[in-house]
């Protein structure tokens, strides 16, 4: 079978709210699928971002009495921080679990 060229994205979270567990679950599942595709020899690119357009962003910015660009910038920074913390936490948890398995097998 010929190698495939695949472009993947996840549902884009609105820039007017925080990332929640549902977002993280989707990102992790998508990341696993993309890694699997790469292991199969496929060219696979995973792109994700915030949905920074539309009425919900304008309404939230108006409610907070700030420009929509300022709202988007602040939420984007928090989204990136939450993702970094979540990924580090997940990696640490996996490492601890693997260490327990190794110790129990010794």
Image: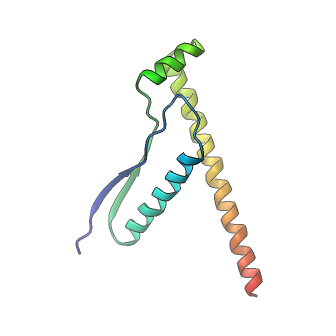
For residue 2, above or below residue 104:
above
From the image, which quarter does the C terminus lie in? bottom right
Q: Position of residue 45 (x, y in %)?
A: 37, 55
Q: Position of residue 59 (x, y in %)?
A: 50, 17
For residue 4, above or below residue 59:
below
Q: Residue furthest bottom?
A: 106
At x 59% / y 46%, what residue is drawn?
Answer: 83
From the image, which quarter does the N terminus lie in? bottom left
Q: How many marks?
A: 0
Q: Where is residue 85 in the image (x, y as percent from the top left)?
A: 66, 48
User: Where is residue 90, by image quadrant?
Assistant: bottom right
Is 6 positioned to the left or the right of 17 in the image?
left
Colour mapping used in the image: rainbow
User: Where is residue 30, by image quadrant?
Assistant: bottom left
For residue 23, above or below residue 1:
above
At x 58% / y 27%, what residue is drawn?
Answer: 74
Is 51 positioned to the left or the right of 63 in the image?
left
At x 48% / y 23%, what residue is drawn?
Answer: 57
Q: Position of residue 17 (x, y in %)?
A: 56, 31
Towards the viewer: 12 or 72:
12
Q: Residue furthest front?
A: 22
Is 59 positioned to the left or the right of 104 in the image?
left
């Amino acid at each position: 079978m010929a190698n495939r060229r695949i472009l993947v994205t996840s549902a884009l979270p609105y820039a007017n709210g925080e990332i929640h567990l549902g977002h993280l679950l989707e990102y992790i599942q998508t990341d696993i699928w993309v890694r699997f595709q790469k292991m199969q020899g496929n060219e696979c690119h995973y792109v994700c971002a915030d949905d920074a357009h539309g009425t919900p962003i304008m309404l939230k910015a108006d409610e907070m009495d700030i420009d929509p660009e300022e709202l988007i910038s602040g939420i984007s920074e928090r989204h990136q921080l939450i993702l970094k913390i979540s990924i580090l936490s997940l990696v640490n948890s996996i490492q601890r679990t693997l260490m327990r398995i190794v110790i129990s097998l010794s």
